[in-house]
Image: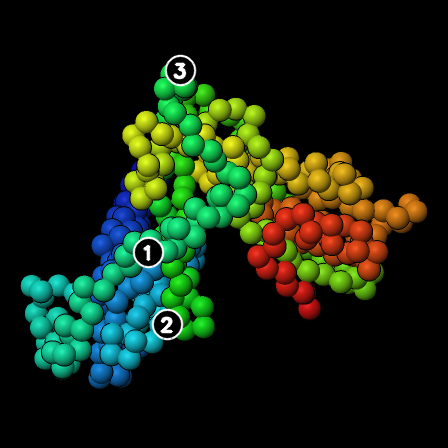
Amino acid sequence: SNQQNTIRITDNQIERRTDAETERKTKKESTVKPGDKIFYKMSDTEKEWVVAMVINRGGKKSGSISNYWNVKNLRSGAMSGLNLDEVDWIKEDATSQEITNIIDQLSWEIFIQNVDEKPRDNIQAKEKEIEKWKRFGVYEEVNKSDYPDHDLLSCRWVNESKQLRNEMTYKFRLVARGFQEVDAPISDSPTAQKSVMRMCIIMCNIQAWRLESLDIRAAFLQSNDLDRIVLMIPPKEFRTSNEIVWKIKKPIYGLNDGARKWFITMKKKLTEYGCKPLTLDPSVYVYHVENELSGFCVLHVDDFLIGGNDKFYKEIIEKLSAEFEISSRNKGT
């Protein structure tokens, strides 16, 4: 009987494994990508289908709502977020009889409207990114023949679309293919844990301090200069000559040690301001005035959690804001 039980358990495990594999396969087959056209309705009771264009992913692919997308209604032009796991939907497929039935319920004018509308290259957005590189002194043009012993990295554009107040804004980020570096640099960088952030929030509540979150604009581009030579082939839109390459002076996005270089930059600055790191967590910097804790700064890559009294904000945060470009600063409640 023990052998039979063992066999029965094994069979159940196989069945569960098969079910899990089927579920994963089904989920994979149901994914969409930017530019796809879908038809959806919010529930079985609704009769009208909505035709929409998928713009970009609204949640993290590895998150709990990985099937959440920003879509554009092709009838009204309105932007909205849509969790495909919570609605009835089907991807456009000319060979599908179900699609044919849906199209019969819609006007052909709506069906063919914006059929070719997909996120496209936006030269103005790319020019804006390169202007940012120039403003922060990220690169200089050099002749590649002057560096015969150095490999060249390639790069690519990453389209980071965002939905702001019912409008889509397109942002392009130029990213180096850092994996092409032969000698990989040290890349570890301390980041704050959630438990540490909770502790600091509690401290703010106890001390009746002001609590804020702070985000640095293009943080890596505002880091200290690299201590090695990195050469990159410019993107084709800004390539002046096949002999001219870019000598990268900042830890741009895509380089393996970008986050580490940014942390070292902040470590140096906060130390200059008089802050000290915690012994047990180097991502947390504290500021004392006359041996009394005046405030703290928690580092999580380019996001900061800060809290303290008026003296801390005047002597630390104002200096930080004057030296680095801040993209957002929000008060806690």
Left or right: residue 21 versus residue 153 is left
Is residue 304 at least partly visible in the picture? Answer: yes
Q: Which residue is mark 1?
A: 122
Label at residue 269: none
For the point 22% across and 84% down, which residue is it?
47
> Residue 236's x, y, as percent?
30, 40
Return the disc, 2 or 3, that comes first in the chain's sequence.
2
Q: Nearer the viewer, residue 54 or 63?
A: 54
Label 1 sits on what residue type?
A: Asn
Classify residue 318 by image quadrant.
Answer: bottom right
The secondary structure type at the circle numbered 2 is: strand
Is residue 133 positioned above or below 210 on the image?
above
The secondary structure type at the circle numbered 3 is: loop
> Residue 42's x, y, as percent?
30, 77
Label at residue 149: 3
Label 2 sits on what residue type?
A: Ser
Q: Which residue is mark 2?
A: 80
Label 3 sits on what residue type?
A: Asp
Q: Nearer the viewer, residue 88 or 179?
A: 179
